Each structure stands twice: as structure tokens, then as C-alpha cells.
Amino acid sequence: MTNNDIDAVMKELNTHFHSVKTPIVDLIQAKTEQPFKVLIATILSARTKDETTAKVVDELFKVVNNADDLDAISAEELDRIIYPVGFHNTKTQHLKQLPKVLNEEFGGVVPSEIDDLLKLPGVGRKTANLVRTVAFSLPAICVDVHVHRICNRWGYVKTKNPLETEMALRQKLPKKHWLNINSHVVAFGQNLCKPRKPNCDICPIYKYCKRVGVK
């Protein structure tokens, strides 16, 4: 796959995205338009299935709507609510630390710059990039396991890890696609281009894909 193909590929992925279930972080943004809730949902979604994250945030957002609410809830109650997500103990610690950092460093407002987002507890590059694109509609490239795996499967990049993939995409991917690359590829990876036994027979971008590593 080359940059001559990428516009057609992203067009097909856009059509597919709107025909399937929306990834949870995009859904939170569509429902609330609140960067704080997008941030919380993104932190909780790490190493967790979207279905599980959706149930947890539905319960959590009944009692936590802002940094003050997060500060007021006890660690025990917070951990009880988010227990189903992966690494819930660590995420409880990070979320309880979050209000203090937001208030002291950013006046209680979720920042939009990557370097600032990386100062927040529990926020790595993937989370920072995703919050920047989804919550603020600002250009960034969020690379998770789906984006890393699929871009290499396409033959669009040849990289060893998500960070290398992010850097390669920053050099190669036209900027007009940065906002949607994660959401659209994640939906594609969850529904069609699965790690094992991808549905190549019904893939809308079959003719563009080199199918690297697919038997």
C-alpha cells in the first residue's frame, strides 16, 4: 500500500466506521463533548474491551462528572466501580492523583497539547494522542495495537512497535487523515481485520493490502 492508495483506503474505512459500533472513546465524545470524560474513558479503556469500558463509564459518570467529583469519591468506592477494567488498582491510583495535577498544573482544565497531557497520571503517548484527536479535534496520531498491527499488515509501514509506527505515520500519512486514523482503523480491526483469521473475503480494501503475515 502506498500514499497513492491511502485516500481511497481511508474513504472505505470511513464508510465501514459508520456502519459498525463506534469505539467507546469516540462514543463518549459524541455523547458528552467533555474532554474530562474523554480523558477518563481513555485511561480506563487501556487493556480493556470496549464493552467492559462502556459499562464501567456508564456507572462511573453517574457520580463523577468533573475533577472535583473525582477528588471527592473515595478510592475504595472508585475501585469498586472500575473493578471490571484491566489493572483497576493502578488506574484507581492514577485517577485519584489526577484532580490535584489538573488543578495545580492546568487550572482544573484538561490540556490539549501532547507534552502537557503526558504530565497527567496514567497518560502515555497513546492516551495523549487519542485525547488530543477525539476531545479537541486537533492533529495527532494515536497508535494502539490495532493501528500498529494493521498498518504493518497493509505494508504501509514496516515497524517493530507502536512508537515506531507513530513516528513512521507522522512522516508518511497525509495530515488530513490524522484525526481519523485511530478511530477508523480500530473499528476496522475489531470487526474485519482481526489478528487471527481476518475477513479478507469481504474486506473493502483487499486490493490495496499486501496482507503481510496473513496466511
Image (cartoon, rainbow, N blue to C red):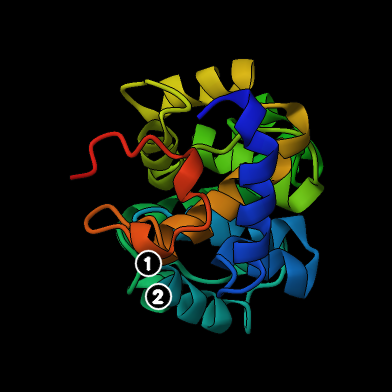
Binning the other alpha carbons within 10 Å of mark 1 as few (below 14), some (14 to 19) or many (20 upward) gives some
Q: At numbered mark 1, what does the secondary structure look like: helix, strand or loop? A: loop
**Extreme top residue here?**
171
Residues at discs 1 and 2 in contact (Cβ within 8 Å): yes
The relative height of residue 1 versus residue 77 in the rendered view (above or below) is: above
**Category of crowding for the residue at label 2, using alpha-carbon neighbours closer than 10 angstroms: few (below 14), some (14–19), many (at least 20):** some
90 above or below 156?
below
Which numbered dot is residue 52? 2
Coordinates of residue 73 in the picture (x, y in percent): 55, 71
- Nearer-the-camera pick, 27 or 194: 194
Say which amino acid is labelled 2: Thr
**Which quadrant: the C terminus?**
top left
SS of the residue at dot 2? helix
Q: Nearer the viewer, residue 203 or 31?
A: 203
Measured as percent of width and height from the top left, residue 187 is found at 51, 61
Residue at 41% x, 53% y is: 46
Check disc 1 and report the residue beneath it: 49
Above or below: residue 202 compared with residue 181: below
Identity of the amino acid at label 1?
A: Lys
- 194 relative position to 100: left or right: left
Quadrant housing residue 14 = bottom right
Residue depicted at x 38% and y 43%: 145
Which numbered dot is residue 136?
none
Task: Report how far apart the C-alphas of labels 1 and 2 lie in the structure.
Answer: 5 Å
Task: Give x and y (percent) for residue 176.
Answer: 78, 34
Tell me which residue sits at (63%, 84%) in the image. Answer: 62
